[in-house]
Amino acid sequence: MYSIKKEALGSLLAAIGAKRKLYVPADNAGLILFTPYADGVSVNLSRNPDVSAKDFFFPQVENICRFKVCGKTVDVIDNREKNEDFVVFGVRACDVKSFEVLDNVFLSEPVDGYYKDRRDHSLIVTLACSKPLETCFCGTFGIDCAAPGGDVEAYACGDSYAFRAITEKGEAFLAELSLENGGDEAVEACKAKINEIKAKLPLSDLTTEGFGGGKTKDLFNNPKWAELSASCLGCGTCTFVCPTCQCYDIRDFDTGNGIQRYRCWDSCMYRDFTKMSAGQPRPSQLERFRQRFMHKLVYYPENNNGLFSCVGCGRCLRKCPQSLNIVKVMKALREDD
Amino acid sequence: MQELIKKGKELFANGTVDRIIGWTRGELPYDREIRVFRCAECFEKDFVYDAFCGANLSKYLIEESGKEGKIGVFLKPCDSYSFAQLIKEHRIKKENVYAVAIECYGKCDSRALADSVEDAIYWITDNGPELKIDTVSGAVVRNTYDYMLEKCAACKTKKHAPGCDETIGDEGEKVDDCTRFDIVAKLEAMTPEERFAFWRGELSRCIRCNACRNVCPACSCEHCVFDNPASGISQKAAADSFEENNFHIIRAFHVAGRCTDCGECSRVCPQHIPLHLLNRKFIKDINELYGEYQAGENPDERAPLTNYTKADCEPSVVYKRGGKN
Amino acid sequence: MSVNNEFRPKIVAFCCNWCSYAGADLAGTNRLQYPADVKIIRVPCSCRVNPMFILRAFQRGADGVILCGCHPGDCHYTSGNYFARRRMTLLFSMLDYLGIEKERTRVEWVSAAEGAKFAATMNDFVDTVTKLGPNRRLEDLRCKN
Amino acid sequence: MNRIGVFVCHCGTNIAATVDVHRVAETLGKEPSVVIAKDYQYMCSEAGQNMIKDAIREYGLTGLVVCSCSPRMHEATFRKAAASAGLNPYLVEIANIREQDSWIHKDIEEATEKAVILGRTAIAKVQLNTPLTAGESPVTKRALVIGGGIAGIQTALDIAEAGFEVDIVEKQPTIGGKMAQIDKTFPTLDCAACILTPKMVDCAQNDKITIYSYSEVAAVSGFVGNFSVKIKRKARFVDETKCTGCGLCTEKCPQKKVPNEFNLGLDNRRAIYIPFAQAVPKVATIDPDYCNMLKNGKCGVCAKVCGAQAIDYKAQDTYVEQQYGAIVVATGFNPINIDAYDEYAYSQSQNVVTSLELERLMNAAGPNGGTLLRPSDKKHPKTIVFVQCVGSRCDDSRGKGYCSKICCMYTAKHAMLIREKYPDTNVYVFYIDVRTPGKNFDEFYRRAVEQYNVHYVKGQVGKVVPKSDGNLIVYGSDLIEGKRLVIDADMVVLAAAIEPDKSARSIATMLTASMDTNDFFTEAHPKLRPVESPTAGIFLSGVCQGPKDIPETVAQATACAGKVIGLLVKDKLTCNPCVAHSDELMCNGCSSCEKVCPYGAITYEEKGFRQPDRTTKMRRVAIVNEAVCQGCGACTVACPSGAMDLKGFANKQIMAEVDAICL
Amino acid sequence: MADKEQIIRISGVNPLKCMKCGKCTATCPNYDEMEYHPHQFVYMVEHGEIDKLMASESVYKCLTCFACVERCPRGVEPAKLIEAIRTEAVRRQGCNRLKADDIPARIDDDMPGQALMMATRKYTR
């Protein structure tokens, strides 16, 4: 355990930022967004950032390669960005868990080289949630926001921050910073306080009972889906703010003298998602809506040893234009039993 | 709200409608979902009309009015213009809708309200000018007017568009000292460099989630050009800053003269982009160059972009007006 | 290829088939010079020009876009240029609002008899855009190489 | 894969002098889809065209690019060549490297570089061209003429002559129009009735012509070749098929105080009337505003005296629906209301008359039986003052901005006739300019001055003051003498401006035909297509298009008939294939496109669409009538969903051109 | 020529609109008193003969009855030109046609009081 005074955080970040690329949660138009650290950036650790940390590894848009037309021949150029080591500061337990969900997808064979390269270059400094919100339900999925994990764990305890290395990589990172030891009791107190709040959260009693692998038959034809999906606009907000949504599209952009092939986030909420020459197996918003939640709560755990692909970060609860969300879905489907 | 519930039950009872679309309590204290109620009992039980019912119901009527039977709807003044405009564009089948005009004194920006409270909220009591918020670590109070939606703070009218079947309460008036163009004017007064920097800052946050488009009652296209590879400009992500600009310019242009300034785009944007400032620029220009026009207000009037006069100003007017150099 | 280090703008000119394209032809017939930076796209009427085309031109690296049509009142299709006039006014105003240099866009009415006006307009426009320098605010970097 | 052929023309030295044509061909030959690129001295020559045709066959070209002069010059030539070699003519694109390149640049490098870019642009476009076939639509071989004046009559007769059915719709009880009211015609001074009435009779007797008199057009739908028109036949309360036109009823009708519109209210007629002796059809009409029987059920005299039992007081308006291939507008004109010009005392003195009223006063069939007597006391006028340009050539706020064209000549005619018949009459004509462009026109005017001693005064009348004895003091200026004339006149004749008939506006709306600010119909082209409206299938005859005299009207009427016949002889109309097309899967049915279409080519239909969930949803979608669409593309931009596109100038094609230029 | 532009600017009249019909002159109630007549005013302004006009009594013979303005088919408004010439005359110091002292001698018994007031306003500064 290492500890620094709260006011020393700025110089600590500056020290990290001097050596590596550093991303910190910072204010931006009333939002908190992961922002490259620089002088004048207004660091804000008060709550979980509005956009998840997934795009450090799985960015919204990523170049894959370029095809260049020269007369009647075509050259293929690998023009992906070269990654350097980088640090993300202030990732919460839920987002850390989401990396596991993403890893299962991108790092299982065949390994996604683009994703892996970014993962390899990263170092994650997490932060325990001292003030979880009414939208938080990470506990539902067995995530402890008081023990966020990552390479280095950080705690905001009173007037100081405490840091603990979790991985070897984290150990080396902290060693470099030559911090003072201490803070163990403060962390325990902090954890206790967090647990106290957790018990009071409005969504603290939500459980995964009734969901998980093997529940497809129970849930798929539930008549509730129609009503649940009725007001869904089919926008992609929930999928884009979600830390675990990992669907992407590969597209070609005609630059006039060649093709830029890139991949970008896609959303199962979109009507051309899964559209094939033979037609659209999910013809209406009902099927698309059902797909998203069935995937999070049934299909993914079925294929990943019971790991749910929802981490309870609550972003979709905050961001859905029409107040639809996974909690409502879980509660509604459960009512039947 | 009781009056609305009474009206709803009456509409069910006398067979005017077989369903009503309205707001209902959501998962969180400030969440209001949209639901189609199919019986008087569930309507009475779950229907809610309060400070958090900011969502515009009009767009749902495109789909709903195409179904059999007649649907009831409650329309706030700003929603009624979207409704009237969609009827004008033949998107809503009026004969299948029973529209009730209702009063509105401004709705709460629930996201801003929630963000203003550090702790988890488990209940909100609406005391009119004050909102009492119970959190896990005690109660806090917020002034309602400080947390109004932008569209309500800059409300243009409390008067409904024509086309509603009946009105509950008194019909309001246009807001005389409406401030909705203030920020547009402020931007116009900037230098192009400042404006460019402003919009880059805003639009670079765009994640192309399409919430603005999908919630917009004017964006009711069967197939949006941005989703249609045949259009030549389809985009799934803003892969370059150009595409951020392009999407928002074209979207604003496509709704120019049709946008009723209902403010939904800005309400739903998860990235807090002030999209209404784009639409209002067009509205302001149209008002100044071609005469006052409010989409949805007059069912027989031509939209400004499908109309002209021989004496219209030349495009070079742009060089002379607006903005410094 | 001529080696020239000074900035030469790329200009796209949309010309309506009936007036302005014929005006451009007349400029040619009368041997009235204007810079080769201007390339003309023939459209049936100024009202055929979609704002998408103009943005597309900027995306692809155009430095200026000019739209030429029949004089108001003389449209071959009676009213097309009136609609174009409104559309372009609003579009240009919006571009200006977004901080895109408004001088990069222009509408001119050129009749089939106005070869001289066509050439003069193009000379002036190229001049204006050359002074502005390359379009940086509405370009797509992917199209650069 | 596309197989494009590129042909670069030298145009002698026109292109080759400033553009390195070999290099252009060589560079373009390296473009991905180009399979052959050649240059040649004159592509438009027979040898050049053969080169193209051979290449189409040899390489199986799917597209052709010709780098040459303006497409306005030779696009048709190369399209024809392509078609003869089996390539769809719309798979040809022209790169204009002469007018827009070689002729305006001096630097060979620069011009060559530009030629390559223009060529590449054309290649980019042609790859997206689709074979287009001109559509066809059938033609109903029947024409409608709206208006039965001399213009309508002449057009109808000429069309009937060619063997096509023609219907004339005339809102008055008889055809004949203004010419029937005129006494003599300039410059020949022959009797108007003598030349008009035989034509009216011809119309009545021609079995190809149907006259709907006392009728109006109520609604028009359809498009060129296929108009559907609803005609309202106003109740005339007399059975046309039974009435013999004997006129007994018009003598016996007790209601004698109806102002006679044919004589411009200068005398009275009965409530049942035949407008004039030579009316066609010669049947009586009851004026419901004056008939006692119709107003209060007390009378019935006409029914009693009618031997043919043609009177039917219970008659109602009826409607006829008819199909037409072409519609001719011949709605004519009226003199303007001159009450606003109170300086001329028109409303104060009966002895101030308009020229048309003078026509009736001098006409043998007029109120005075042809003797010119002034209206107030039926005395022979000894001094008559003519005032020109009353309401013509005015500022917009004061009258009509245009010259009414016919006044100078008819005034000369009136002056001359008066001087001839009553040599003791003093005749003054106040003029601003005397306009006599026309065959034998100036000679005619000079005759009035030289032979008949009409006093032409360059100047204008400022004021007319009626006196108690009916005479009028006329204050006029003589600008040449530089003095003011004060004339004690017996009569003043005002040459009132003419304006289109008031009914024209609503007819234009029904026909979607355009009008100018004066409500004259606009022609498709002021010089090259003067008798057609821009709306296909609508033709213009007579003064409805602009002021003109009888010879010009007849000339235009015949020209118009020629155009109509040219349309009606076709069994099918071929349409311009570069028309708008709506993708109904994407169409919202929002009506934006319809609002900007100048031709009314877009209509809407409720159509069922199979949904992904196998249900059928009804949706309103736009349908473009390809026969009516002229291909301007206004709708393509109005359409927010991009459902509307223009064939031959599709969004993708234009964007490909943009891309190629900006590359 | 500057004079001409000045008159045109003051009056707002475009003399080129005149089509020389003479209706203004024909309608002028004070025709007989004038050396130059309304249509000539227009013509002379068009030709820049301002000094000649300004020197002429005719300018002051105009009754400003506006008959010429009312009747002119082209909306040329000759009376406004005359008014402009009068104004210009007043503006030129020393060009005042009448000095205040000269007026009493010219008053006769028939002259209405209002005309006197108008004249004072018109002819003096």
Image (spheres, rainbow, N blue to C red):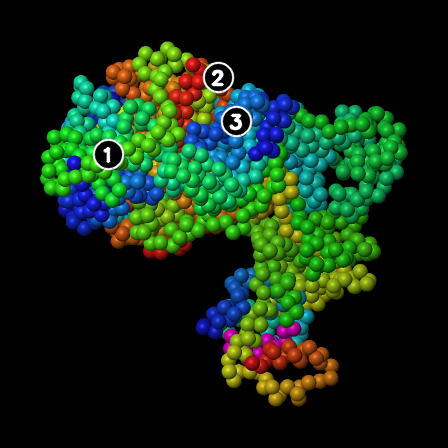
Instruction: Quadrant for residue B229, please give it.
Output: top left
Disc 3 sits on a residue from what chain? Answer: B
The residue that mark 1 highlights is A188
Q: Quadrant of residue B207?
A: top left
Q: Nearer the viewer, mark 2 or mark 1?
A: 1
Residues rendered magenta in the picture: E50-63
SS at badge 2: strand
Residues under numbered marks 2 and 3 in contact, where contact means CB atoms less than 8 Å apart: no
Residue D430 seen in render: yes
- Identify residue type, mark 3: Asp
Instruction: Name the secondary structure under disc 1.
Output: helix
Residue at 46%, 21% in the rendered image: A227
Residue at image coords 47%, 41%:
B131
Question: Relative to D336, does residue A253 appear above or below in the rendering?
Answer: above
Q: Which mark is residue B247?
A: none
Report the residue at 82% width, 54% height from top: D378
Q: Position of residue A270 (x, y in %)?
A: 36, 25
Q: Which of the labelled discs sits on residue B46, or is there none? A: 3
- Circle 2 sits on which residue? D616
Q: Chain of mark 1?
A: A
Q: Quadrant of residue A84?
A: top left
Residue E55 part of the magenta segment: yes
Query: Which of labels 2 and 3 is toward the front?
Result: 3
The quarter of the picture where the C terminus of chain B appears is bottom left
Picture coordinates of residue B22, whole percent (x, y): 52, 29
Disc 2 marks a residue whose amino acid type is Thr
Q: Is residue A126 magenta?
A: no
Query: Magenta segment, principal secondary structure?
Result: helix
Please tell me whether mark 3 sits on a helix, a strand or a loop.
Answer: helix
Q: Position of residue A191 (x, y in %)?
A: 26, 33
Q: What residue type is disc 1 on?
A: Glu
